[in-house]
Image: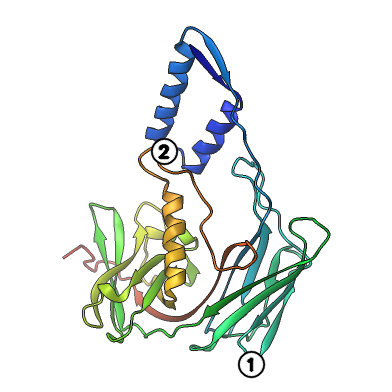
Amino acid sequence: MEIVLKNLDKILKVVGEKINKNSFINQTLTLFVFIGLASGCTETIELELETAAKRLVVDGNVTNEQKMHFLRLSESVSFFSDSASPTVSGAQVLISDGINVERLSEAQDIPGIYYTSENFGGVPGRTYSLSVSNVDIDEDGEMEEYTSHAPLPDVSAPDSITMEFDEGWNVWKILLYARENPETEDYYMFRLFKNGTLISNTISEYSVVSDKFFDEGNANGIWVQSIDAGQESGEFEEGDVITLQMCGITEEYFDFVQAVQQENRGQYPLFSGPPANVPGNISNGALGFFSAFSVSYVSLLYHEGEDYSEK
């Protein structure tokens, strides 16, 4: 019996893109199609490609750094959509710590991007509340309001970092030396800069860990980040500066980052559950996450001729 799937080309195209064109899965899908087409009779199966209701997507954070902070608002799109997420303009966006209220402005040349004043910074120990209003995502003629709350934890200052080259993984390992309070349960996020440019700039490249990897409050060469030696960022010259950003984050944001990274890696085996939206911390059914975290930095200089091989 020949099975003809309507919309099959679209399904295979989009699913292939969503799973980063994993060769094993693509080959398996191709095998299923071949088996169906090679059968004798014909039966048409129609797959209903339902479109979910649009939802607001929020991506933004507050840190303890005195600088301009940004928040992005967009709309969700169908899993099978080929278009980028539409931006959301004209919103009223407020951030408050219970004492002061910061009104964000929308960038004129980049719709959907909202920014604070240049000297805005969070205070560890306070909780930051986000309010997004004057938007009509479901287009029912009534304006909606979305809120979120994010505590801003403190973070210990790292002592130092070293780097080692791992031939097996073909990566540069960034090893952390630091101390923290062994009596509290803490969570950390790590990002990397090279010569002042952020090179771990997507959530899939963030590294998040809990302090259970610290030995009674001590990090003695813990592997916390990596640089792919096969990429341009993994090529070093004399005097290059590698900087590790150590962030104190909440357990909720730790769970969110891990869940997003799990979805990005795909589900195995092949017939595991379908991709799903990762739950965030925005009210009213919105997607995404509003986070608050403290940051601290530590750097090292790359010297040619120094032995960075794994000991």
Residue 111 in percent (x, y) is at 74, 62
Residue 80 in percent (x, y) is at 61, 40
Displayed quadrant of residue 62: bottom right
Decide which of 298, 134 is in the foreground and name it. 134
Secondary structure state at the residue bearing disc 1: loop
Decide which of 229, 11 is in the foreground and name it. 11
Task: Tell me if mark 1 has few (under 14), some (14-19) or many (20+) residues whose alpha carbon lies within 10 angstroms of its own.
Answer: few
Q: Is residue 268 visible?
A: yes
Q: In the rendered image of this protein, does residue 91 appear above or below residue 121?
A: above
Label annotation for residue 149 = none
Instruction: Name the N-terminal-most of marks 1 and 2.
Output: 2
Secondary structure state at the residue bearing disc 2: loop
Tell me the CA gap for discs 1 and 2.
50 Å
Q: Which residue ends up furthest to the left in the rendered image?
A: 311
Residue 181 in percent (x, y) is at 30, 87
Residue identified by numbered label 2: 22
- Which marked residue is nearer to the observer: mark 1 or mark 2? 1
Task: Tell me if 85 is positioned left or right of 308 in this view.
Answer: right
Residue identified by numbered label 1: 99
Q: In the rendered image of this protein, does residue 250 appear above or below residue 38?
A: below
Q: Quadrant of the C terminus?
A: bottom left
The amino acid type found where label 2 is placed reads: Asn
